Amino acid sequence: MSSFLESIRGMKFFDMHVHMISRTTDDYQAMADAGIVAVLEPAFWLGQPRTGVDSFRDYYASLVGWERFRASQFGIRHYCTMGLNSKEANQEALAEQVMEILPLFIYKEGVVGIGEIGFDDQTPAEEKYYRAQLELAKEANLPVQVHTPHRDKKRGTTRSMDIAIEHGIDPGMVIIDHNNEETVREVLDRGFWAGFTIYPFTKMGNERMVEVVRQYGPDRIMINSAADWGISDPLAVPKTAALMKQNGISDEAIRLVTLENAVTAFAPSGQISLSDFDQPLTIDQSQRFNGSSVLRGGQAPRIDKDSTIIK
Amino acid sequence: MDMRPVSSLLFALLEQQPDAERALTWLRQQLDLYRNQPTNAVFYRVFTAMPRFTGKAPVVVSDEMATALAEARPGFVLVDWTMDRLARVWWLLQYPSADREVYQRGITELFRAAEMNELVALYSALPVLEYPEDWRFQATEGVRNNIADVQAAIMLHNPYPAEQLDEAAWNQLVMKAFFIGKDVTQIQGLWARNNPRLQAILHDFAAERRAAGREVPEHLPKLMSDTIE
């Protein structure tokens, strides 16, 4: 039992950005053990570029199908945002076809917004599909989860917000993700939600995160792991909660930035609310634990990871 | 088979549910809209948006209704259905079926983009879809699915597989039901479609389970050794 778990026992967390399609069942088990009750999986790229629209279709279907079910087996609620990511927006012929099938998916159960969309390289094609998807979000009255670029980040973040406002979208309906110390002030001042990704080496470290919460307070700030196929940590949210607690941040502030703010931000979709989390997942008819390739017939859902014996 | 009586009964069943007024108003509006504007875009949107308007309360089926449904479509039983599932199956019966190819393509598109609760409704609807023989392959895809409730929707309380699947596909369904721990007594036609090849497969499976020190599933020995007429 990792010691950080002790200090946050009983707390509930919502990792509002994590790519579970790239993670194992061991991760799901560890996340559930650490208090994660819900995850949000934004549609993104897979590391390997897709070459046909059917690859997108199957990916979107898995976000509302297999992945949701997989999460439910560990008692975790799975939500997603649907969209065409900025990298793949650059293949314009394919992007057109993807835009045609997106409306099939945005009204599915568990879809809480359009995302993650925005800029990567800040090309004209990226801008075109960012704008087109902002219009889609407006039409469907869905929140937008915006990916901000690694390179030329500050300008890219400002530009993403300018364009959203230009399309008449209320900043309260937009979650600007992957913030850092350089972007957060403008995002909050302009009335947007600010997501922070705790991701080693390239995004935020969690000691820095503690300082951000100390400086700006917990309003409109939310934390995620963005764990994916890279070197990342699906326990980043509970670990950061533990670190905040250790550094004297109040339980209420921790609760806001690791659970409640994200739920409030995505609630306008009508697909997520805090009261969902009060009900055990198993009472939902559609999410029984019996039988699947993950938990083959009759196998106990829990295995002892420390034992050398495998039955 | 004429499915109009089933459609009427399913709508009547929706009307019998408590607090269904909002859902019914919306469904009537959408049906009018779809009749004026019969496009796939409208049809798919209504199918997908269903739980937002119907909710997911469990459906209560009276004895009279169960009897009427079984008369209109033998073997068609609604066990543990929810409002969204019922409304979706009713909605599928509103899809125009005059052109066989258009019908098959239109419904298949729904399967291709379906989330898990939509798949449950779609597989539940197989016994009441037109051109029953056109859905045989789709039914085997349901058996191959990994999501517990989707598997249950095709395997359990569903008359379609026993009526339509060939022997190999049927045997796969039964064997998979044992393998994933389903209650096989809820499979329609379990005994009637028993066959020597299935019994041989079950026999090998039982031996494999014993060799692994695992239990042999309930009902397997009986099905394995039952005399086949």
Image (cartoon, rainbow, N blue to C red):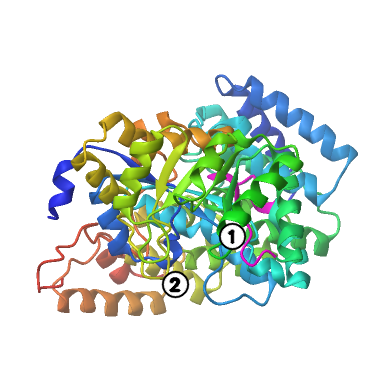
In the picture, measured across the screen, residue B57 lies left or right of residue A254, that is: right
In the picture, measured across the screen, residue B127 lies left or right of residue A93, that is: left
x 75%, y 37%: residue: A168
Report x, y in % for residue A14. 38, 43
Q: Quadrant of residue A297?
A: bottom left
Question: How packed is label 2: few (under 14 Cα within 10 Å), some, or many (20 or more)?
Answer: many
**Is A46 or A158 nearer to us in this picture?**
A158
Q: Nearer the viewer, mark 2 or mark 1?
A: 1
Which residues are the magenta region?
A: A104-122
**Is B101 or B221 nearer to us in this picture?**
B101
Circle 1 sits on which residue? A60
Taking the magenta stretch, the answer to whether it contains residue A118 is yes
Asked if disc 2 and disc 1 are in contact, CB closer than 8 Å, the reply is: no
Seen in the picture, residue B146 relative to A164 is either above or below; the reply is below
Q: Amino acid at mark 1?
A: Tyr
**Is B204 or A123 nearer to us in this picture?**
A123
The circle drawn on residue A263 is: none
Work out how far the residue at label 2 is from the one at label 1, CA to CA, in angstroms. 32 Å
Q: Quadrant of residue B89?
A: top right
Circle 2 sits on which residue? B171
Say if residue B92 shows up in the picture. no
In the picture, measured across the screen, residue B192 lies left or right of residue B110, that is: left
Taking the magenta stretch, the answer to whether it contains residue B53 is no
User: Helix or strand or loop: what does disc 2 sit on?
Assistant: helix
